[in-house]
Image (spheres, rainbow, N blue to C red):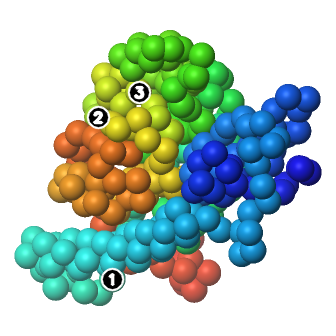
């Protein structure tokens, strides 16, 4: 096995496609191409992924991801039309002369640089203003403490790698000690909540594969993974953040819609009632280079 090889695990029936991240003396470190899963495996349990290098589970995840993206685009259009109709009633037909969108701004911290790159590409595609940083999970609380006052986001995404530890047997799923990074995520959430206590003013999306869902909500997250302690898709946190960014401040984010339309479903993500962060402004922003202005100040 070489770095970068696409592989599947024989013992799991080749259900997930991985990329080889590191080759060690006893084990090979592998990372899911679609799911936020970092694992180790004996070399004799790995085989190169068949061509095309996509397992059935990975293929289905990509189909669901494409469907979710289409729904997000449709949601954005419907949100804009509903907001415009509402503003016509309040502000009159002047709204039709032009308005501008102000979606919520996202600060995304990710413990995986490749997933971060995919996430930022999707934010850009959806026209969600976003700033992203690759940060080790153990450093996220400190980074947020210094970054939040500068960035002043509407939505914070705290994600990376997590999982129930093999060495903790029997598993005590109530204890944060049984998870790889849930304690780090909870600490970062607490820092964010110290910065902004209002859960509608700062929306927090947190967690990764098999994260301690209940502890993350208790720490102050609006949305978190993973109720069923399952693997979540790499882009599920992005879907939730984008949904919140394009849900009106007058409305609450549709949790049922999130549960049904994220790739991982109700066992992968959940949350609490939360207002969106999308706004409309008037009048339409102008191209300043075309304005003819008479200066009034010497």
Q: Residue 155: horizontal and vertical position, in percent?
A: 42, 45
Query: In the structure shown, which secondary structural element does the residue marked by tag 1 occupy?
Result: loop
Q: Circle 2 sits on which residue?
A: 199
CB contact under 8 Å: marks 2 and 1? no
Instruction: Answer with mark 3 or mark 1, whichever residue precedes in sequence.
Output: 1
Left or right of residue 89, residue 230 in this image:
right
Query: In the structure shown, which secondary structural element does the residue marked by tag 3 occupy?
Result: loop
Query: Is residue 151 something one can see in this rendering?
Result: no
Residue sitting at 25 percent across and 86 percent down? Answer: 96
Q: Circle 1 sits on which residue?
A: 98
Label placed on residue 212: 3
C-alpha distance separating marks 2 and 3? 20 Å
Q: Residue 249: horizontal and vertical position, in percent?
A: 24, 54
Kindly indicate the quadrant of the structure image that contains residue 38. Answer: top right
* Crowding near the residue tagged with mark 1, few <14, some 14–19, many ≥20 C-alpha atoms within 10 Å: few
Q: Residue 164: horizontal and vertical position, in percent?
A: 51, 26
C-alpha distance separating marks 2 and 1? 31 Å
* Crowding near the residue tagged with mark 2, few <14, some 14–19, many ≥20 C-alpha atoms within 10 Å: some
33 and 110: which one is in front? 33
């Amino acid at each position: 096995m070489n770095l970068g090889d696409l592989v599947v695990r024989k013992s799991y029936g080749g259900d997930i496609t991985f990329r080889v991240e590191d080759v060690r003396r006893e084990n090979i470190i592998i990372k899911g191409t679609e799911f936020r899963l970092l694992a180790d495996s004996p070399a004799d349990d790995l085989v190169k992924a068949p061509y095309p290098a996509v397992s059935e589970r990975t293929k289905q995840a990509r189909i669901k991801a494409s469907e979710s993206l289409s729904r997000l685009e449709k949601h954005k259009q419907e949100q804009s039309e509903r907001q415009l109709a509402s503003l016509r009633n309040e502000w009159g037909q002047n709204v039709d002369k032009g308005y501008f969108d102000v979606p919520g701004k996202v600060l995304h911290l990710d413990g995986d640089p490749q997933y971060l790159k995919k996430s930022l590409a999707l934010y850009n595609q959806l026209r969600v203003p976003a700033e992203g940083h690759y940060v080790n999970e153990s450093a996220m609380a400190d980074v947020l403490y210094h970054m939040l006052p500068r960035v002043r986001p509407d939505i914070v995404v705290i994600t990376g790698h997590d999982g129930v530890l093999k060495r903790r047997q029997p598993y005590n799923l109530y204890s944060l000690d049984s998870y790889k990074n849930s304690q780090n995520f909870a600490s970062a959430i607490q820092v964010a909540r110290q910065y902004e206590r209002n859960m509608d003013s700062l929306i927090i999306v947190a967690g990764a594969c098999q994260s301690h869902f209940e502890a993350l909500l208790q720490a102050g997250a609006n949305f978190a993974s993973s109720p069923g302690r399952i693997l979540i898709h790499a882009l599920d946190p992005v879907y939730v953040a984008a949904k919140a960014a394009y849900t009106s401040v007058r409305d609450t984010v549709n949790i049922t819609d999130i549960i049904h339309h994220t790739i991982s479903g109700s066992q992968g993500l959940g949350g609490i009632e939360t207002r969106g962060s999308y706004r409309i402004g008037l009048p339409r922003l102008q191209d300043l280079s075309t304005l003819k202005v008479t200066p009034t100040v010497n």
